[in-house]
Structures are given as C-alpha cells and as structure tokens.
Image (tube, rainbow, N blue to C red):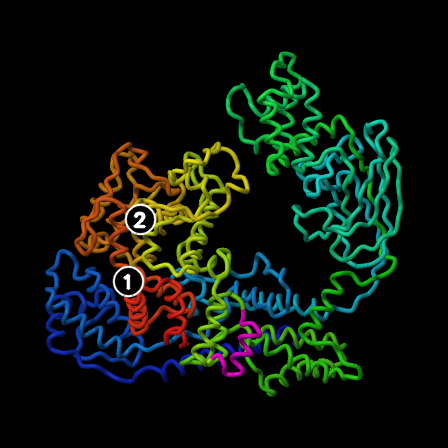
C-alpha cells in the first residue's frame, strides 16, 4: 500500500470514528425530558391548527395534535420553534382562516417561548473543518508562505444560511480529501524537496515569434522585434521568451542577436538591459525589481550577436528592455517628449484631432485611444491632405489641454501606448532577432532553494551539531505541531508522527523522504483540518482559535496561544483586551471583506453585468463594494449606534461616485466626463455628510446592495423584499409551496410589477408571505438595478407607486418611511445582525435559547446607548459564542 493511500485510509477511518462519536455526544447532551401541553394551549391549537396539522392530515409533515412535547431529539424543538415563528410573524393561520385573538396568541406563544428557552440548548456545532479561506490562510501563517494559494480546481465550500462557515455544509468529500493530499505533497516538496540531480545540458532558441508582445511594448517587422520605450512597467516596454523557463538553478550561456533601427546621429549607443524575470511575477511588475544580468551596447544597424555567461534560477526567464530609449511612459518625461513632437504642426494637428475630434467638442474617453487603436486614429488624421493646421500652435488651448492630459500618470501611460507605434514604424527603436540559452553547466542554489531552507528552519529549527535524525525530527515536531494544531500536543501524539518517519527510514529511505512523509501526515490530520471538536463550553485553545479565525480569518498568533497556555486568557480583562487588539484595522481587513461579502451578498457583484443603459463601469462596481466595506469599518471603529446602519448622517464613497450615482451636491467639485476613467484622486473613499431621513445613507441606499438584489438589467420587488426580510430584519420565511407557479413578468409590458403581484397573490397560500415581502420590495422600486433613483418603471413609463402597509399595520409612502420604521425598531435589525455574526463566527444557526441571549444583548446595548463595537465585543463574551 502506498504512503499516500495509507494517509487517506487513516483519515477516512478517523472520520468514521468521529461521526459515531459526534452522534453519541449529541445524544448524550440532549435533555431527556418531556413537557405536558396545558389545556389552554391545546384549546388554541385545536381551534386553529388541528384541521391541517394533526395525525390524520400532517400538512407540511407537521403534527401538532399531542398532549406532551418530547424533547429527546432536536426534531421537537425545530417543529415547535417553526410553529412559534409562523404564528409570531402572522404567516399562520392562512389569511382565509379565523385568526388568533391577542389572548390566544399570548397563550400559545408564551407557553412555547418558555418551553423552547428551557429545552433548547446552547451549542450544537458539529466539529467543523476549516473552510477554504481558513485553510489557505492557515497554511500561509503556519509555514510563513504569504504567497501560497490554492489551485483553481480546489473544491469550493457549500454555503448554508448564506455563509461558507456553517459546519453542517462543510462536509469532507473524496475530491476534497484528494485536494488536501495534493497540498500536503506541495508543502512537503517545498520543505523537503527531492534530491537534486544535474539535468543534461539543453539549448533553447527563441525567434521573434517566440517573444512576448505585451500591450504595445513591441511589434514585429520582418525578422525583427522592435522595442520603443524605457518605461519601468514591463508590460509597456519589455519582451521575454514565452517558451524558455528555467527549471534548474545554475550557470547558463546566453546569446542575444540585436540591431539598431534608424538610430539618431550623434546619440549614445542604445543599451539593451537583460534581466532575470520571475515567470510567476505579474506583467505589471517594474523592470527594476528583477536582477540585472547584462547591459548590451547596440551600435550597428546590421544584426550582431553577443554571448555571455549568467546565473539563472528556477522559475526565471530572460527579460529585455531598451533602457535609454527616447520614449518614456512616465508623466513628466512623456509630456516633455510630446511637447517636442508638437514642434511639427502636422503631428500636433493630428494629435489634437485624435483627442478632440470635431473641435470644439469635449475630448473623448482616453481608454479607446490606447495602443494600436489610438495610433490608427492619429495616422488617419496625419495622412489626411485636408488636415486643418489652424490650431497647430503651442499656445493654442487644445495644445495646452493635450499637454495637461499628458502630465496625468494614468493618461500618459495610455497615450504612450499609442505613441510607441510612431517609434516602431519610424525609429529610433531597438531590434531583437534571436535569443539562445544553453545550460545548465553547473547547479547553484537559487532564491527558491534559499527560501526552502528558510521555510524548513522556521518550521523545524536548525539542526544541531551531532544531532541524530530522530533527535532532530523529534525536536522539530515539538516546535511545529503546536503551531499546526493550534494547541499543546501530547508526547503520545508527537511520537505517533515521529514513528511514521522512523518506519520510513528503517525501510531504507533517505532522511528527507521520511520527513516528507511525516509532514504530509500532519497536514491531513483532523487536528489540523478541524476546529472545535470538543462538545460543550470551548476550552481555552478552541476559544482562542474561534476568536482568531472570526476576527482575522487566520489561526491564533503565538501571543494568543501563549495567553491561553498561561491561563491569562481566562481573565475577563485580558480576554477583552485580546478581542480589542484583534478588531479589524482597515476597511479591507479580511473579516470585514469576507463577512460583508456573504451577509450582504456583495460577493455577487463580479458576476453582475449592468446594462449599458446605466453607464455603470467596472470601476464603479469596485467603488460600490468598497463603499460597503468602508461604511462597516467606520461604524465599527467609531462605535456608532446600530441605527446608523440604516439611517446615518454620512456616506462613505468617493466624491465623483456620490455626484454621478447619488446626486450628491458639491459646490467646489467639477463634474467629470462620465465616460472617462476615474483618476486616483477620484477613487478616494471619503466620509461625506448627509441629512438623516433621506433616500441615501445606510445599507439599503447603497449601490452595491441594490445591485446585489437585482440582476443588472431590471429589478424584482419580491427578490428585494425577501432579501431585506432575511438579511436586515431576520424574518424567517417558510419555503414556497410546491403548487405555487413562478412569477413571470408580463412579456407585453402592459402591467406594472404591482399589478402582476396582485394577480399572483390572490391565492391564500401566497398572500400571507407576500403581505410581508411586497411592501418592502415595492418601496425599493425607486432604485434601479445599479442603485440610481427613478420615478417610473422605464419599460412602461408608468409612475412607480412605492406605498404599502407593513405587517404591523404601519403605512409607508416611500423609502424614507421604511428607513424610519427600521430605525424606530432597531432592536429587530440588531438581533438580525447579531445572529448573522454568530452564524459566521460559530458555524451554526443559533438555537432558540441562544437567540434569546442575543436579543438580551442587543436590548442592553440599546438601553446603554452603546454602539456596534460594543455589540461585537459583547457577542464574543456571550455563552453562545463560547460554546461549541
């Protein structure tokens, strides 16, 4: 049996054992009691429920006709909690049946509240594995590999309750087991790589068709590739072979054939820089970030070959840049060069026509002018015999506007991409004809070899003089296992892994091979892959892990583990200080980004393509998402009251975004061309003041959320209404009955969404839920699919009627009324937010008893006039949070 299969089998056996243990644990924890149902409650159930939910009917598989409640299993709690919810939220009895009187409702709900609070327990999370993000971050942190990432094919996590942290959905499938094995091999290969053997000498030849044409950095002409720019951005100035990748660090011989195309007389020799590019590096890298190998002087217009010896390392390829080219994409240098070119009237006139077609119209967007497209437009004007040269003077306003544009960093790079073609066609440019690499002649330690050594020493320590293999491995495990398993490790467990290596050595394998197998075994251990496996109150190490993964999405730091080991973390003051130290420090913190993406569905935005009619760019989609994250961060760090989630006196977005999408008024801000790209300054997120009670401000007025609850083309009141009930108000909704037809829009465009829903909800089975959904959905119809304001439905040109009646009888006439109602009932939102945070943090849906605790916390925060930060800290000090 192979070592890989042994590990898989061991893991599978553990899972089978753990499943039985989990079931035993849960059964043991269940409260073995029964509760008689009072006659008064039975009378209410008999009057309003038994017609559909007794032993004979059991509609929806629910039988309420019984004299006592058996709490032996969780099924009873789920059924009676569901009963509580549908009655409390007026979803039952059906609207065409006699409704409960206030006294009857109090009798039934009071009894159920008492019983559910008493008989539903705290905790109940199954031992949960690390989700995809936690697993990746754990590898990065434990092994000090910040650039480690999972392959695109690594299995995705299933979502439950909107989150990918819920234990019931985090199953361990065969594909995931195999993926864990592959990662274990990958990591073990880095720390204990296979023995290196010198490969045979190989020769690579790269002709011009094997060299990369990046953006407009290079073009092909005959037997040559021409370079034109000295820009430090490799994608704008460099080329490199697409088929040469060094796999063994060593000494190589390189030959480069070059020539000069139309060099200027009197100029210094062209200098070709040869650097060692890391293939894995981004094409947006700077050339100077790569190691310089050689500078070649190119003086002849006929091809010459230069041969030299270099060290190339694993994962590298040669990179070529004309370092003293005339053209530079950097703003100041580009503007100066352009001004020099403007001395030629025809060049200047053609450039003006390219930027300001049909003067005096406003300039066009720069993006379509980049690269070959811009050059073709310029050439068309330049070669036009009727080109008007009247404005082709340096003091002309169009000339000055063109120079101002050239001094903008973003614009200079894009226009520089067009100007490169001038040099490619007219010179001067540097020509490459062929690149040859031969080797390796001798192996050397490259950066990756040194990095592997550092990783190995970080995780297992430096081998001491005279230390045996077993002594070194044992000492390394003492250092490594507690970090990997996030808790102290017993001698028995440590020796079990040491034995794996010893048995492999005894079978004749090398030291590194035994360490390789041992390391792989630890990486597929349940002690690493799973969190919080002990039922009941979390022990101090599981608590440290829960806190760390919740607030940082990383495993606990050595400082927190030390506090746990010393017992200091049990001190409430130390625990509170630890929580505060781990709170997010920026809007882009992993916890803020991950939680808001899942709670508010902003993770869906990249998949939504707004209709062109809205003019909503990809940049604006990113800014909309950033607004949500900055808003959440502001409320947390400033400890703002919970009502500010709904109706604040500020927004957090860029000034331009606010002006163009929210109608925000700024007297000192000029309105930008809506077709132009955002500048760096225009992308800056700021805190902008607004009046409370308006249509902007708060979660429900933010573009990202309004986009996430639409499809980019149109809106659906039901979709938005359901979303608000689930994610803002925490209202549970029953599943749609099987016999209810889907709501389809009227293809003739003759009916409003309100009329379509009115027809749909004539059925009593639909009406109860839609009485809750529709008023909220309609009041948000004034927001289009990207969050812009509208007064009429565009397809039918009918004025939008946003009015409605909320389930408690409150009449609303527009979105500000809904904001006001939620703000006045802010504990409803607060409890919903608390539940979402706890689902995300604990990996389970809170039980009825836990929700009562969360409700008490939210109520207390409001009574104390506390804020969101107070709420978050109180939740992490709760019994709900501290129980598995």
Quarter of the figure that contains the N terminus: bottom right
The furthest residue to the bottom: 492
Q: Quadrant of residue 504?
A: bottom right
x 18%, y 76%: residue: 66
Magenta stretch: give its range.
Answer: 555-569
On residue 692, the disc is: 2
The furthest residue to the front: 668
Residue 174 at least partly seen = yes
For the residues marked 1 and 2, what is the alpha-carbon distance in whole angstroms?
Answer: 19 Å
- Of pointers 1 and 2, the one earlier in the residue sequence: 2
State the SS at label 1. helix
The answer to whether the residue labelled 1 contacts the one labelled 2, judged by CB atoms less than 8 Å apart, is: no
The residue tagged 1 is 827
For the residue pair 58 and 202, the one nearer the viewer reads as 202
- Are there few (<14), some (14-19), or many (20+) residues within 10 Å of tag 1? many
Depicted 342 relative to depicted 563: above or below: above
Of the residues tagged 1 and 2, which is closer to the observer? 2
Q: Position of residue 667 (x, y in %)?
A: 41, 36
Q: Tell me: 618 left or right of 863.
A: right
State the SS at label 2. loop
Q: Tell me: 214 left or right of 89.
A: right
Q: Position of residue 269 (x, y in %)?
A: 85, 35
Depicted 828 relative to depicted 783: above or below: below
Q: Is residue 403 magenta?
A: no
Depicted 875 relative to depicted 643: above or below: below
């Amino acid at each position: 049996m192979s070592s890989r299969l042994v590990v898989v089998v061991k893991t599978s056996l553990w899972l089978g054992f753990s499943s039985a243990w989990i079931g035993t644990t849960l059964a043991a924890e269940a409260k073995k009691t029964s509760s008689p149902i009072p006659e008064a409650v039975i009378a209410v159930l008999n009057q309003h429920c038994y017609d559909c939910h007794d032993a004979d009917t059991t509609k929806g598989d629910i039988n309420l006709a019984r004299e006592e409640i058996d709490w032996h299993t969780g099924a009873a709690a789920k059924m009676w909690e569901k009963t509580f919810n549908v009655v409390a939220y007026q979803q039952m009895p059906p609207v065409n049946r006699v409704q409960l009187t206030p006294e009857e409702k109090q009798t039934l709900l009071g009894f159920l509240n008492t019983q559910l609070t008493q008989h539903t327990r705290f905790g109940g999370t199954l031992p949960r594995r690390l989700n995809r993000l936690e697993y990746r971050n754990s590898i990065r942190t434990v092994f000090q590999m910040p650039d480690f990432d999972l392959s695109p094919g690594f299995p995705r996590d299933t979502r439950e309750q909107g989150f990918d942290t819920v234990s019931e959905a985090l199953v361990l499938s065969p594909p995931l087991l195999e993926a864990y094995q592959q990662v274990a091999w990958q990591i073990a290969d880095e720390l204990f790589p296979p023995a290196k053997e010198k490969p045979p000498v190989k020769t690579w030849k790269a002709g011009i068709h094997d060299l990369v044409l990046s953006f407009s950095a290079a073009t092909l002409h005959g037997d040559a590739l021409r370079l034109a720019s000295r820009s430090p951005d490799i994608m704008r100035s460099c080329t490199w072979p697409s088929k040469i990748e060094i796999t063994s660090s060593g000494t190589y011989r390189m030959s480069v054939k070059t020539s000069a195309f139309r060099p200027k007389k009197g100029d210094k020799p062209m200098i070709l820089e040869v650097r060692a590019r890391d293939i894995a590096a981004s094409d947006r890298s700077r050339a100077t970030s790569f190691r310089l190998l050689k500078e070649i002087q190119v003086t002849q217009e006929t091809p010459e070959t230069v041969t030299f010896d270099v060290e190339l390392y694993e994962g590298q390829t040669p990179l070529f840049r004309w370092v003293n080219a005339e053209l530079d994409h950097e703003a100041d240098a580009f503007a100066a060069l352009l001004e020099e070119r403007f001395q030629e009237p025809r060049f200047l006139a053609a450039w003006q026509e390219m930027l300001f077609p049909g003067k005096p119209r406003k300039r066009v967007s720069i993006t379509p002018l980049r690269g070959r497209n811009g050059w073709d437009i310029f050439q068309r004007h330049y070669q036009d015999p009727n080109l008007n040269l009247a404005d082709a003077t340096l003091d002309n306003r169009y000339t000055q506007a063109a120079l101002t544009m050239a001094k903008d960093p973003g614009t200079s790079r894009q226009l520089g991409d067009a100007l490169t073609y001038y040099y490619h066609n007219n010179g001067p440019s540097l020509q490459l004809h062929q690149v040859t690499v031969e080797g390796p002649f001798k192996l050397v330690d490259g950066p990756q070899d040194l990095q592997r050594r550092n990783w190995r020493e970080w995780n297992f320590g430096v081998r001491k003089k005279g230390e045996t293999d077993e002594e070194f491995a044992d000492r390394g495990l003492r250092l490594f296992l507690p970090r990997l398993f996030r808790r102290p490790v017993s001698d028995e467990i440590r020796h079990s892994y040491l034995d794996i290596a010893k048995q492999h050595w005894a079978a004749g394998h090398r030291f590194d091979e035994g360490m390789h197998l041992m390391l792989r075994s630890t990486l597929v251990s349940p002690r690493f892959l799973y969190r919080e496996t002990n039922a009941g109150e979390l022990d101090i190490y599981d608590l440290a892990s829960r806190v760390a993964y919740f607030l940082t999405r990383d495993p606990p730091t050595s400082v927190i583990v030390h506090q746990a080991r010393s017992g200091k973390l049990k001190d409430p003051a130390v625990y509170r200080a630890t929580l505060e130290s781990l709170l997010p420090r920026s809007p882009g913190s992993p916890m803020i980004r991950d939680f808001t993406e899942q709670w508010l569905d902003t993770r869906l935005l990249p998949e939504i393509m707004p209709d062109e009619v809205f003019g909503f760019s990809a940049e604006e989609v990113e800014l909309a998402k950033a607004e949500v994250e900055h808003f959440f961060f502001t409320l947390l760090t400033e400890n703002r009251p919970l009502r500010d989630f709904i109706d604040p006196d500020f927004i957090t977005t860029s000034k331009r975004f606010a002006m163009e999408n929210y109608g925000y008024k700024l007297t000192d801000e000029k309105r930008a061309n809506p077709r132009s790209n955002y500048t760096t300054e225009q992308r800056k997120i700021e805190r902008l003041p607004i009046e409370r009670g308006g249509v902007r401000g708060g979660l429900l007025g933010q573009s990202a959320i309004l986009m996430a609850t639409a499809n980019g083309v149109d809106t659906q009141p039901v979709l938005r209404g359901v979303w608000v009930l689930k994610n803002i108000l925490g209202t549970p909704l029953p599943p749609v009955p099987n016999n209810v037809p889907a709501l389809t829009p009227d293809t003739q465009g003759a009916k409003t969404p309100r009329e379509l829903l009115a027809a749909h909800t004539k059925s009593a089975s639909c009406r109860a839920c839609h009485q809750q959904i529709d008023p909220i959905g309609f009041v948000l119809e004034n927001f289009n699919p990207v969050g812009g304001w509208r007064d009429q439905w565009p397809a039918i040109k009918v004025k939008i009627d946003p009015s409605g009646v909320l389930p408690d009888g409150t009449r609303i006439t527009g979105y500000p009324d809904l904001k006001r109602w939620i703000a006045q009932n802010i504990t409803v939102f607060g409890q919903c937010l608390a539940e979402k945070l706890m689902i995300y943090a604990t990996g389970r849906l809170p039980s009825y008893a836990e929700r009562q605790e969360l409700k008490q916390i939210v109520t207390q925060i409001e009574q104390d006039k506390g804020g969101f930060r107070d709420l978050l800290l109180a939740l992490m000090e709760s019994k709900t949070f501290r129980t598995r």
